């Protein structure tokens, strides 16, 4: 389905390049958030 | 999976994600600060310096 639509006008190469930056950034953010929750729970346990 | 960027504009997607994350963060922090149990600003930890110093003086039997 996605092959039929290109609403943003991005080429495959451009989409792959942005995706290669976006995904590690997202996982980095998740790692940061999980780490912050672990540290916070060590200091102020809420469970 | 990368083809998602041919369906949604990266700039608009990033703006939406940043906006939502900031709003969510402010909302959750605000909610926690309105509670009694989870408010980390007014829970007395760590003990304020004047109170800690007064406790140490009393433990050592100092009169002041």
Image (cartoon, coloured by chain):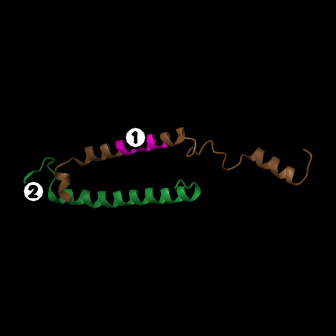
The colour of chain A is green
Q: Nearer the viewer, residue B56 or A31?
A: B56
Given the image, what chain letter belongs to the residue carrying mark 2? A
Q: Nearer the viewer, residue B49 or B63?
A: B63
Residue A30 higher or lower than B14, as above or below: below
> Percent position (x, y) of residue B45?
66, 49
The colour of chain B is brown
What residue would you read off at disc 1? Answer: B23
The residue lying at 67 percent from left, 45 percent from top is: B44
The residue lying at 44 percent from left, 59 percent from top is: A34
> Percent position (x, y) of residue B48?
72, 46
Quadrant including the N terminus of chain B: bottom left
Span highlighted in magenta in the image: B19-29
Q: Residues within 10 Å of mark 2 (few under 14, many from 20)?
A: few
The residue lying at 9 percent from left, 51 percent from top is: A5
What residue would you read off at disc 2? Answer: A3
Report if residue B23 lies within the magenta region: yes
């Amino acid at each position: 389905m996605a092959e039929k639509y290109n609403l943003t006008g991005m080429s495959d190469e451009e989409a792959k390049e942005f995706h290669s930056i976006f995904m590690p950034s997202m996982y980095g953010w998740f790692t940061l958030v999980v780490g912050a929750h672990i540290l916070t729970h060590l200091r102020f346990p809420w469970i | 999976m990368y083809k998602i960027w041919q369906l949604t504009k990266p700039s608009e997607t990033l703006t939406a994600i940043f906006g939502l994350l900031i709003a969510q963060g402010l909302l959750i922090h605000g909610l926690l600060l309105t509670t009694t149990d989870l408010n980390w600003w007014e829970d007395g930890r760590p003990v304020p310096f004047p109170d800690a110093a007064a406790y140490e003086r009393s433990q050592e039997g100092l009169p002041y």
